[in-house]
Amino acid sequence: MIKIGVLGLGNIAQKAYLPVMAAMQDQYEFHLTTRNPEKRQQLAAEYGFTHTHATLDELMATQPAAVFVHTPTATHAGIIKKLLLADINVYVDKPVSMDLQEVQGLYDLAAARHLLLTCGFNRRFAPLNQQLKAIPDKRLIMAEKVRETSDQDVETAVFDLMIHSVDTGLYLLDEPLVTTTGRIVATADGKLAQGYFTAQTAHEQLQVVTNMRGGVNLETSTVQASSKRAVVNNLSSLTTYQTAQTQTTTFPDWTPTLERRGFAPLIRAFLTAVATHGANPVDPTSAITSHAVCRHLLSD
């Protein structure tokens, strides 16, 4: 059975990954890794995992085929490089790094060693976003993320939150970028208030908006095509508008949240690629572009 490591068992791992992995233990042997012994014991018992480790070196000694990295962003680059040099495929939470040269270097290393480096852009795999992607003849694309009120320094907010909307918007485009512009609005104490990114292709216009103080928690993606308009709201409903006709599609009540938000499909796609030596489910060039846009927003 293929061994898969999970490094870092914090909030994102517990909410978005372990529930999916727990249901796949008949296909993969998961190895949980954290320095916290109480957390190791608790999560192993809760989900029925039988292999746990205290350190990355202990995990690597088991020779896993791949490792999911859920540690703080500042630790990503060193851990990813160590895993790739040991010929281990890597899945990592976004961002890969906030240093664009590190991002490019790590993807170059993965390519040179014929390994996967997959960034966790789950919204590409959200079923309703994929329906937006399939709409032909797009003209206007909008990706908006609004927080009721949130205080994060500008760089952290751009790479922690805004990067999701940037990546979603770029994913929905069907043509190469021609021009881009952006704007960051910061508070007096250096927090992100709003972030704006605009891009044009030959026929499409993209608008990305992140509002950290908008009075509501909301995420929407909109596609205006030549024949209709479609809006995905909070990854849970799709409303399509045509002349004299409006139709809203939602998921059945029993559809798990991790399926609706794209985590489960992305996890399965990555593990299948590992098992079959298949293509990276998150195209490296597109992932680098999303990181580059965020870095350039901060540099302008």
Image: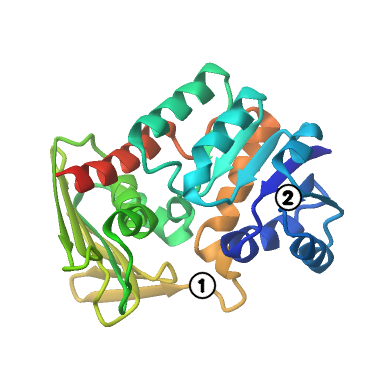
Q: Describe residue 274's horizontal placement relative to residue 173 as left or right.
A: right
Q: Residue furthest top?
A: 112
Q: Position of residue 132 (x, y in %)?
A: 34, 56
Q: Quadrant of residue 18?
A: bottom right
Q: Quadrant of residue 45?
A: bottom right
Q: Describe residue 76's horizontal placement relative to residue 275 as left or right.
A: left
| Front residue (pair 147, 2) | 147
Q: Which residue position holds label 2?
A: 33
Find residue 138 and name its label.
none
Q: Residue furthest right?
A: 50
Find residue 251 and name its label.
1
| Front residue (pair 162, 241) | 162
- Report if residue 272 is visible in the image: yes
Q: Nearer the viewer, mark 2 or mark 1?
A: 2
Q: Describe residue 38's horizontal placement relative to residue 215 as left or right.
A: right
Q: Residue furthest bottom?
A: 215
Q: Residue furthest front?
A: 189
Q: Position of residue 222 (x, y in %)?
A: 26, 62
**Which secondary structure lies at badge 2?**
strand
**Which secondary structure lies at badge 1?**
loop
In the displayed structure, 191 sits above or below 34; it is below
Image point (74%, 34%), residue name:
60
Image point (39%, 71%), residue name:
234
Image point (66%, 30%), residue name:
88
